[in-house]
Amino acid sequence: MNDNGIKIEVHLIQNFAPSNLNRDDTGQPKSAFFGGVRRARISSQCGKRATRQWWRGNGIIAVGERTKLLKTKLFNHLKVEGRTDEQIGKAVDTFISQFYSKMDGNKTAVPIFVSRNEINEAQRLIEQHWEILSEGEKLGPKDYKEVSNTLDKAMLSADIALFGRMLAEQPGRNTDGSCQVAHPISTHKVDMEMDFYTAVDDLNPEGETGASMMGVVGFNSACFYRYAVIDRDQLARNLARKTDRKNGTWVENLTKEDFQEADKVIKAFLEAMVYAIPTGKQNSFAAQNLPSFGLFIKRQGGIPISLANAFAKPVRANRNDDDLIGLSVERLTTHWQDLQKCYGNQGVVNTTCFHIGQETRLNALSTSDRGSVEAAIDAVMEDAKQ
């Protein structure tokens, strides 16, 4: 991350009802040890997937495609009268293997993360070099360089610009992610639970008893701490495709328009962090619970800081009617204040938060806004433009 650029952090406290939002290879809710005890966990990849799907469903931001079926996508676009399936197959296979990944039958060897604009450019470039590619011949050095440069400049989708991508066979076209997303963990110790379920056959003869099937599913209920940080400069460079380095410095300078595009994506990401919920087992549990507290921090320079260590000692509900949510918010804000006393300001320019109740627990915060989600996001985004 750029040490001197603007960074925006997201810290959320979100309590979920009994659920199995993100399963491991055995079908049980993911977990991790932290502070010496078992915690509920949701993988960062699961959160990113929920963000991308929320954007896709709401049409807020254009997202890319992560797929092994790039050949099928390009093949269908290239089917025109006079071309045989064999010619199209040769052209697409040759192009993908030279600029993206080896082919394994009709699929790429690994999933490829591409933007829609890249797919359109790939189609145009195959058309442009049809005579060579349709014979199954790779492009020569001059054409290769021209095509590679064109693909390098093709506009990235917001999710690739945020989360990055790796092309193992084309390392020069990798994209460094501008957003780091932590694995959400519970602020408290969790015990995994099992639900024993049965299903009854509605057409059983009268008098016949017993279930037609039975099984078990794991679940838990947890109050999560969630954290992510965005490097605004890196995001702007990724979106503008100004990511080449020369002698350790950026080749091209960012413009006002570049930052405007980045700010649109940042705002959409902050909204998705709040509203996008993993879909695992939701038809069985319906754990549609939004965050109870959110803290947004803008830094100019300094280093981003996770507040996860606020929960190194697990939170425990007590007999004073203090619930896990309230105690977690209190622990988080107190830890934030302690960090500032020890390490100083670390470039903090502005903090803003939203919350459901909890007013008496926010004394440790010095925020510019305390209120709704929309007001908090608008405040941090307005400040980010300055």
Image: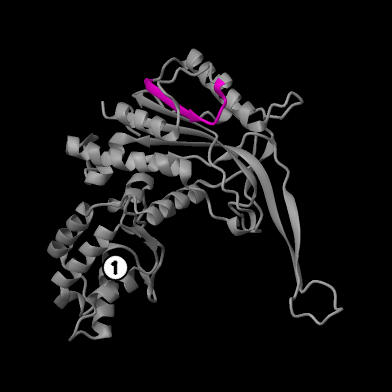
Quarter of the image for the C terminus: give it. top left
Q: Residue at x 37, y 27 (%)?
A: 298
Residue 335: % across, % down: 56, 21
- The residue sitting at the right extreme is 207
Judge the density around disc 1: few (<14), some (14-19), many (≥20) Cα neighbours within 10 Å: some
Front in this rendered view, residue 151 or 326: 326
Residue 67: % across, % down: 39, 64
- Left or right: 286 as drawn, with respect to 111: right
Vertical order, 233 against 142 (above or below): above
Q: Residue at x 27, y 29 (%)?
A: 385
Residue placed under numbered mark 1 in the picture: 96
Vertical order, 123 against 172 (above or below): below
* Residue 356 part of the magenta segment: yes
Front in this rendered view, residue 283 or 266: 283
Residue 312: % across, % down: 63, 29
Quarter of the image for the N terminus: give it. top left
- The residue sitting at the top extreme is 341
How are the residues colored? one colour
- Left or right: 376 as drawn, with respect to 140: right
* Residue 80 part of the magenta segment: no
Task: Write the start and end of the magenta stretch as one range.
Answer: 347-359
Q: Is residue 60 visible?
A: yes
Quadrant of residue 264 within the rendered picture: top left
Quadrant of residue 282 within the rendered picture: bottom right
Considering the whole magenta stretch, tell me its main secondary structure: strand
Q: Circle 1 — which element?
A: helix
Residue 317: % across, % down: 71, 29
Vertical order, 90 against 3 (above or below): below
Q: Is residue 251 visible?
A: no
Q: Residue at x 20, y 81 (%)?
A: 80
- Left or right: 187 as drawn, with respect to 143: right
